[in-house]
Amino acid sequence: MTEATPRATQEITIHTDSREILANARRDIERYGLDEYYIVDVDSHHVELDSWPQIIEHIEDPVLRDSGRQMMQNWPNAHNLALSNHPPGLTQQDVSGRILHQASLAEPVSDREVHRDVTLVRRAMDSMGIDLQVVFPQPMLEIGLHPSPSAAVQLMMAYNRWFTSTILSAEPRIKTMLGLPIEDPDAALRTIREYADHPGVIGFLITSQHSIGVHRNEYMPIYAELERLGLPIGFHAGPNQADSMTSTMNKFLSAHAISFVTCNMTHLTNWVINGIPERFPSLKTIWIESGLAWVPFMMQRLDHEYLMRQSDAPLLTKLPSDYMREMYYTSQPLEITDMGLLESTFRAMDAENTLMYSSDWPHWDFDVPGRIMGIPFLSEQGKRNVLGETARKVFGL
């Protein structure tokens, strides 16, 4: 790896070199001996809108593809937004003194042999001492809020074609869980069958900002196919400032704290109470980017309600919390403000066997691997499991 040139502290912008931002993470490698650990980052991101014109060309529907081209040609502001539902006027994550880097990832890249996103991911992995990094899009994670379900399906499938051919094929250390066009169950099943054998695809994903009931019968063939193939399903949370709860909030902080959690709380409740783990006992399920503080709350709340009304959940053979301990969770954002509460949370969810490290890089609230190494009550084997060994097992790496 080529080191970034040391210099005096500078303002972080979209042009700042990733290696400079991650200089402290690089020092953590020596401090904690991270070279001796197998580290898998289960949740990181790139900025797909930077490559949006290329993605539009992968739209299968010729009419929709032509519409996207015309939008980009005739409306300058749509060059990196055509057909998407990304609200550029509401990007509070990128302002107000926070790390602007994620807004565009416009740092200089001289290597022209691979797509620039490959170079940027390599820089992040090398700086943090990561062996494998699971990379997701950013605005595409809100695709479930698109006003046109058919367009959402086409865009998700176009992105998958572009990402697998352009990014995954260029670097074996980059992995992904491909997003499923869940608005169309047949298209989702087709996606699984098309990409299940791709060496960079280690699972599939439902973007959690979706107003769908994941327990609906039309989705059962999807879960059955994933179970048959031994591939996990993930639910990646996202922001929403316009649903029935967050629309009453006047601060981004408030919506960010709540919306990343409530979407996965909703899907997990439907998932467990409708007996999906009983119907597909070998299907590994991962809850991504909701932090951990909500997990013991849901365990207690669902157990309490179930014990009073078991007739509403006839498929269950054990407590909801027991099913939750058999599922997996990613670490970011790690709520570490109260170490006692965090320790109780780890114990409740059996975190040493169910938690997987994630950085959420390059978002403004990312966590480096050293965050896991600094947890005092975590055993040595627990640290190894969280940082990579559990992911090795879940994904069959």
Image (spheres, rainbow, N blue to C red):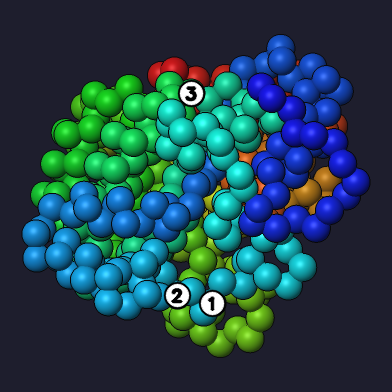
| Res. 192 in view | yes
Residue 228 figure quarter: top left
Q: Position of residue 365 (x, y in %)?
A: 69, 54
As helix, strand or loop, the secondary structure at mark 2 comes to: loop
| Mark 1–mark 3 distance (CA, rounded to whole Å) | 33 Å
Name above or below for residue 26 compared with residue 286. above
Label annotation for residue 87: 2
Residue 56 figure quarter: bottom left
As helix, strand or loop, the secondary structure at mark 3 comes to: loop
Q: Position of residue 349 (x, y in %)?
A: 60, 39
Position of residue 122 in the picture relative to residue 251 (left or right): left
Name above or below for residue 126 compared with residue 139. above
Name above or below for residue 388 compared with residue 279. above
Rendered residue at 43%/31% (across/down): 114
* Dot 3 or dot 2, earlier in sequence: 2
* Residue at numbered disc 1: 90
Identified by mark 2, the residue type is: Pro
- Tell me, yes or no, whether the two marked residues, 1 and 2, touch with CB atoms within 8 Å: yes
**Callout 2: 10 Å neighbours few (<14), some, many (20+)?**
few
* Residue at numbered disc 3: 173
| Mark 3–mark 2 distance (CA, rounded to whole Å) | 32 Å
Identified by mark 3, the residue type is: Arg
